[in-house]
Image (cartoon, rainbow, N blue to C red):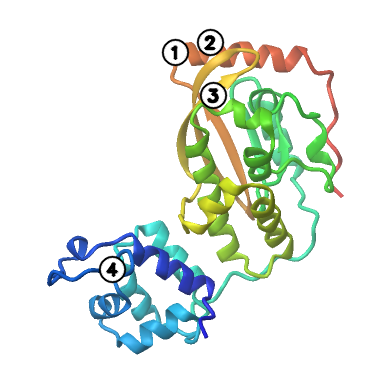
Amino acid sequence: MDRTSPLGAFLKARRARLSPDDVGLPRYGDRRRVPGLRREEVALLAGVSAGYYTRLEQGRQANASPEVLDALARALHLSPAERDHLYDLSSTTGHRPAVSGDYERVSADLRTLLTTMAAHVPALVVGRRNDVLAWNRTGHALLAPHLDFAAPDDPGGRPNLSRMVFLDAPTRALHRDWPAKARAVVGNLRILTARNPGDTHLAALIAELAARSAEFRSMWDAHTVAPCGRDVHTLAHPAVGELTVTQQTFDVPKEPHQSLVTFTAEPGSPSTAALEALKTRGRTVDAPVACAPTP
């Protein structure tokens, strides 16, 4: 019986995208019944037995040494991010411990930084499930002016960036290239679930998105891996028009499950002028709202 594990599903998806030509193997004029490489071909390239690789892919082999994982990464032409994901999925390399508790806190220092940045840079802090834990006025005005500015202060009602991209119509309309943004979100969620396999709330988010969005289901089944870092987005903002911003994501020191996300524009560009108008709007439209105290 095929009991495909997350590791096995990822291996299967990655071999399906390669052809013998990609890895220098002969075809011998054969007609293939499956897309991509066969299991025995991956095993040959990785230097392991076909039976062992089959057991890995079918979930009947739970253990793989770092040496085997490295060999599989080379055989499947994995990117550095995909290689890290492969390690996260393997039960022998030591998953990061699951984080308990539902309430994620933003430190007072980080809230002060967000407020200070508002004069120049839209920014927000996201947690381990892509929940918005805090944002400054300009970040709120850029990404979600239709939502309550104080929403991140309610642990039970925080905006979730992944949910917004797939299920929130204004957020979808904001992104000119919505499919690219959606694929990036799914790729990041793949990384988060591999690193936190015991997070039931994250699993519930994935299940909700799969149940409510056929587009999410299709992208999720592709097993794409896309770590957050730097990306460029063109936004169709309802208040200031079209602008292009560079999104950068930084790990928060001493808070390994939190990230600071910032948005900037090319100096002197029309997008910079649009951001300036947005900053003014963020200061004047909303009445000041005090940040919730950190428990």
Of 204 and 107, the residue lying toward us: 204
Q: Nearer the viewer, mark 4 or mark 2?
A: 4
- Confirm whether residue 251 shows in the render: no
**Where is residue 46, by image quadrant?**
bottom left
Rendered residue at 30%/64% (across/down): 36
Element class at badge 4: helix
State the separation of the CA atoms marked 2 and 1.
7 Å
State the separation of the CA atoms marked 4 and 2.
46 Å
Which three-letter amino acid code belongs to the residue tagged 1? Ser
Which three-letter amino acid code belongs to the residue tagged 3? Leu
* Residue of label 4: 74
- Residue 249 image offset from top left, x and y in percent: 53, 42
State the separation of the CA atoms marked 1 and 4.
42 Å
- Residue 232 image offset from top left, x and y in percent: 45, 31
* Residue of label 2: 273
- Name the mark on residue 91: none
Asked if residue 101 lies left or right of residue 233, the reply is right
Mark 2 in CB contact with mark 1 (< 8 angstroms): yes
Element class at badge 3: strand
Query: For the residue carrying disc 2, how many other residues have a C-alpha within 10 Å: few (<14), some (14-19), or many (20+)?
Result: some
* Residue of label 1: 269
The relative height of residue 121 versus residue 156 in the rendered view (above or below) is above
* Residue of label 3: 235
- Residue 89 image offset from top left, x and y in percent: 51, 71
Labels 4 and 2: the sequence-earlier one: 4
